[in-house]
Image (cartoon, grey):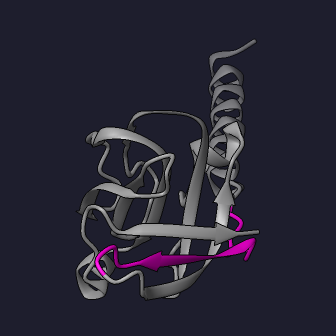
Amino acid sequence: MHFKDFKIVTCFVLAIFSLGIYSCKENKKVIKQTEVTFTKEGKLTLFKTSTDSTKVTIDIEIADNDYEIQTGLMYRKSMKNDQGMLFVFDDVRERSFYMKNTQFSLDLIFISDTKTIVSFQKNAKPFDESSLPSYAPAKYVLEVNAGLVKAWGLTVGDSMSYNQ
């Protein structure tokens, strides 16, 4: 092969290689996240301890298996103020949550096996992976939009009931 032919072949190979790289970049697939929407699975009522009067009633989605508990409200864009997610555990112990892949701020309400509020984590920040501990044994955790614990005037010792 002559030098001139080698040069032509080399240019041709480089041109084909460049087109291959260019076409790979142009054909990137965009993976869209399927929007996860609220599914009403029950109603939850919060009561003021001092008066046994109803404070608020909301629709709830229930997380009671490993997958639902691990996923929680991740990948959702928002939730209405009359909705919440109730985590139901098999045992009673101190709990710790985080906000990984959660796109909006939440209040976490930790509730004992007797359905009494034992503690709160207010205004948990989106995507924050810091630990949000209960500081007390809990069987249930209710997640609602940030600011609702204050707006509803909830305190430790208030109680809840729910039905499916």
Residue lying at the far top in this picture: please name it.
Answer: 1
Q: Report the quarter where the N terminus lies.
A: top right
Q: Nearer the viewer, residue 42 or 24?
A: 42
- In the image, taking residue 122 as reference, residue 68 lies left or right, namely right
Q: Percent x, y for residue 75?
A: 56, 61
Which residue corresponds to the image point at 56% horizontal and 83% vertical from the top-left? 58
Image quarter of residue 95: top left
- Up-down relation of residue 12 to residue 25 (above or below): above
Which residue corresponds to the image point at 45% horizontal and 64% vertical from the top-left? 143
- Up-down relation of residue 111 to residue 152 (above or below): above
Does the stretch in magenta take in 7? Answer: no
- In the image, taking residue 117 as reference, residue 2 lies left or right, namely right
- In the image, taking residue 48 as reference, residue 76 lies left or right, namely right
Q: Is residue 140 visible?
A: yes
Image quarter of residue 90: top right
Count the numbered circles shown.
Answer: 0
Image quarter of residue 96: top left
Q: Which residues are magenta?
A: 32-50
Q: Nearer the viewer, residue 145 or 32?
A: 145
Q: Is residue 30 visible?
A: no
Q: Percent x, y for residue 21?
A: 63, 42
Q: Percent x, y for residue 121?
A: 26, 57
Which residue corresponds to the image point at 62% horizontal and 26% vertical from the top-left? 7
Does the stretch in magenta take in 46? Answer: yes
State whether the magenta stretch is mostly helix, strand or loop. Answer: loop
Q: Nearer the viewer, residue 82 or 27?
A: 82
- Up-down relation of residue 4 to residue 84 (above or below): above
Q: Report the quarter where the C terminus lies.
A: bottom right
Q: Percent x, y for residue 39?
A: 73, 74
- Up-down relation of residue 34 to residue 12 (above or below): below
